[in-house]
Image (cartoon, rainbow, N blue to C red):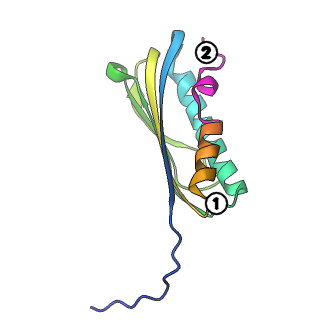
Amino acid sequence: MKFKVIDHNIPTPSVYSLKINLKFKSSIGTDIIRLKIEHVLEEIADELHKQGCKLIGHIKAQLDAGPGGNYFFSITEFATRTKTKGRTISRIQTAIIKINVIVYHVSNEKLKRIVENYFNEERINSNDN
């Protein structure tokens, strides 16, 4: 089978990863953290769309509660809810959040700025219990 190249102008993806170590003043319900992460990922997708992003490869995050379990988050389309799966204990005092984003038609610099603006330790830690 032969293939014919029909277009050499395929967009290059922009990629960004971030890791945040969290330590809460007191233990916090993982349901609160999960909802915050879901909300932030949806805000990132909305802002990327406003800034000219035309395609989401993926926006993924992991809440790593160590022995307390893991929770995974994913967005692959604009204007959709975050998909989630996993299992964690009900309350944690420390966790690691990892985020990985692959999108098209937004520069790496703009992607980094958007992710870091919406996804940061202060925002996730705000109003903790």
| Residue at 62% across, 55% down | 78
Is residue 73 highlighted in magenta?
no
- Residue 94: where, in percent of width, then height? 44, 17
Question: From where the camera sits, is residue 62 visible?
Answer: yes
Q: Earlier in the sequence, mark 2 or mark 1?
A: 1
Residue at the disc numbered 1:
53
Looking at the image, is 78 positioned above or below residue 129? Answer: below
Q: Amino acid at mark 1?
A: Cys
Residue 87 image-quadrant placement: top left
Q: Estimate the x, y position of residue 72 in percent, counting from the top left.
A: 43, 37
Write down the region rendered in magenta: 118-129
Check contact, mark 2 vs mark 1: CB within 8 A: no
Residue 25: % across, % down: 55, 8
Left or right: where 1 falls relative to 40: left
**123 or 80: which is nearer to us?**
123
Percent position of residue 58, x then y? 49, 53
Residue under pointer 2: 128
Q: CA distance from mark 2 to mark 1?
A: 32 Å
